[in-house]
Image (spheres, rainbow, N blue to C red):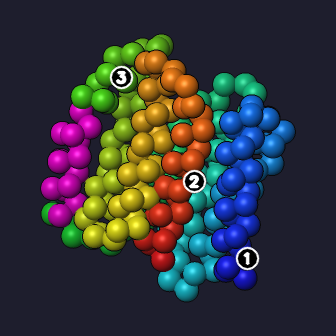
Amino acid sequence: MEALTLVLFFAFAALDWIAVANDWKAGEWVAKPATLALLVLYAALQPEVTWVLLAALIFSLLGDIYLMLPNDMFIAGLSAFLIGHIFYVLSFTVDPTTRAVWLILILAISAPLAFRILIAAKPETMRPPIAIYMLAIVAMVASAFASGSFAAIVGALLFYASDAMIAWSRFVDPFPGARVAIIVTYHLGQLGLVWGLT
């Protein structure tokens, strides 16, 4: 059952990547939520899964749905992913000092990119929630590094890259192939986190 679920996850993920590349909205509507739903199921089948990890994935799925809706529900999607990242942080059982050291280091490295995005974000009322979200995802990445799990670290970095590309293309400068790069890194990032946490 686990193997079948994983195969279906990759199949629907690939379908979603193709749909995004070809601007096939109907395909995205089916494949995007199905991909995360299958990852939730795959995680639930793991013997060491925790309810906190499942909560992180479910809120990610909710964020996916919000961001797919035709009306602009960016803040709703951002909020769902923010809660998901908080649950991801809670999923890592790591030394608090080690996590704090990584948090400071990653914040320092991320600061130039974060400030560039925040300055460009319009309307200005968007800046506080975006800043809070940035802090949450950095905390998630720091937690992954503190865990020492290679899969979790790669997954967290891919998730970070996906979100950074979303913010850059939305607020700073859209670039060719952004949507495909965003969705591929997002799906692989989520899978890496699941592997690292189960």
Q: Helix or strand or loop: what does disc 1 sit on?
A: helix
Mark 2 to mark 1 CA distance (whole Å): 17 Å
Q: Is residue 193 left or right of residue 30?
A: left
Q: Which residue is mark 3?
A: 118
Label 3 vs 2, first from the N-terminus: 3
Q: Which residue is mark 1?
A: 4
- Find the magenta span and give its range: 98-111
- Which labelled disc corresponds to residue 187? 2
| Residue type at numbered disc 1 | Leu
Residue 123: x, y in percent? 48, 13
Q: Is residue 52 left or right of residue 109?
A: right
Mark 1 neighbour class, 10 Å CA radius: few under 14, some 14 to 19, many 20 or more? few
| Residue type at numbered disc 2 | His
Mark 3 neighbour class, 10 Å CA radius: few under 14, some 14 to 19, many 20 or more? many
Foreground pick, 124 / 148: 148
Q: Helix or strand or loop: what does disc 3 sit on?
A: helix
Mark 3 to mark 1 CA distance (whole Å): 42 Å
In magenta stretch: residue 140: no
Name which residue lies at 36% across and 22% down.
118
